[in-house]
Image (cartoon, grey):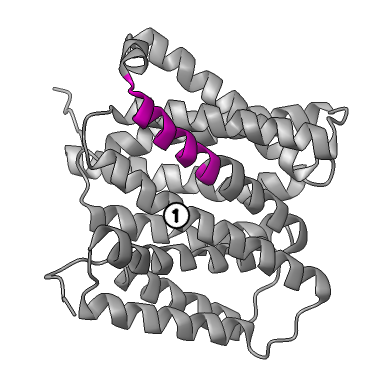
Amino acid sequence: MSSHFSFSPRTTALLKALFVTFLWSTSWVLIKIGLDDIPALTFAGLRYTFAATCLLIFARQRGSLSAMSQISRRDWAWLAILGLIFIAVAQGSQFLALVYLPAVTLTLFLNFTAIFVIFLGIWLLHEYPTSLQLFGIGLFMGGVLLFFYPIELPHDEWLGLGIATVCVLANSAAGVLGRHINRQGHLPALTVTLTSMSIGAVVLLVTGVVTQGLPSFDLQGWAIIAWLAVVNTAFAFTVWNQTLRILTALESSIINNTMLAQISLLAWIFLGEDISRRELIALVIASIGSLLSQVRQSPRRF
């Protein structure tokens, strides 16, 4: 007799989510390699334009394009703003920041996004943090200070941190705006993703071509762009959304926070970015703080 072994739906979802975070972590390495030959904004524009094309094909096969014809003018405006902020500004600035910063440094800095989202949520969504979240914010800030201590950065890295700040603010605003759009529940998630990504990607690509030009790509460049667009964006986002049907927000947050360690390891192996013992301890502290800042219990109001 042959025994049949299968994972539970929750275990399968956890494994899928871990696989997706690994794919997303490899994106940083591939982007750093690609930036040697491809201008940052053009690079980002091509990635998300190709990814949006893949999602368009997927939506057409599923018969989901009819939902786009029912989008109101008001929703079109919100989706356009989301696309401009989340794709054109946030992703464009992320690619630019990687020109000047090590992947590990930028990854750590982008964890500020969760902190900004909490405070924007208080102001705009009236969602208040818990005491545990506030403790997590303090722990995260301590980890960041330890990582950068003493603060002696070359000019290029200061410029990179400035661009990264734009990325953090844009990601934070997009997180709050995306929640505002999705919690209304009248637009399918695929419609929101496809529409906003398409608008933002076109703007980003046009901006990149106009300001930085369209260079001649070798086979490696096209392979990196294709992989990032098809696998690490279109495919990975689809699988991640599937896992969100089963995993709780806390479980997803825990898995998503593993990216900091994954990117650190991948950057050390493939990019030669060394990490000192102090920086490693700082990354662990910041990761724990970032995780705690996303744990929601009974809200505290003040």
231, above or below 120, in the image: above
Residue 190 appears at what percent x and percent y? 35, 27
In the picture as drawn, the residue positioned furthest to the front comes out as 73
Between 161 and 261, which is closer to the camera in this rendering? 161
User: At 40% across and 37% down in the image, what residue appears?
Assistant: 78
Residue 121 at x, y percent in the picture: 31, 62
Left or right, residue 156 beside residue 276:
right
Q: Which residues are magenta?
A: 71-86
Circle count: 1
* Extreme residue toward the bottom, this view: 150
Relative to 270, is 252 on the left or the right?
left
**Residue 262 seen in the figure:** no
Closer to the camera, 25 or 73? 73
Residue linked to disc 1: 173
> Which quarter of the figure has residue 201?
top right
**Magenta stretch encompasses residue 209:** no
**What type is the residue that disc 1 sits on?**
Ala
Image point 46% across, 32% down: which residue? Answer: 196
**Callout 1: 10 Å neighbours few (<14), some, many (20+)?**
many
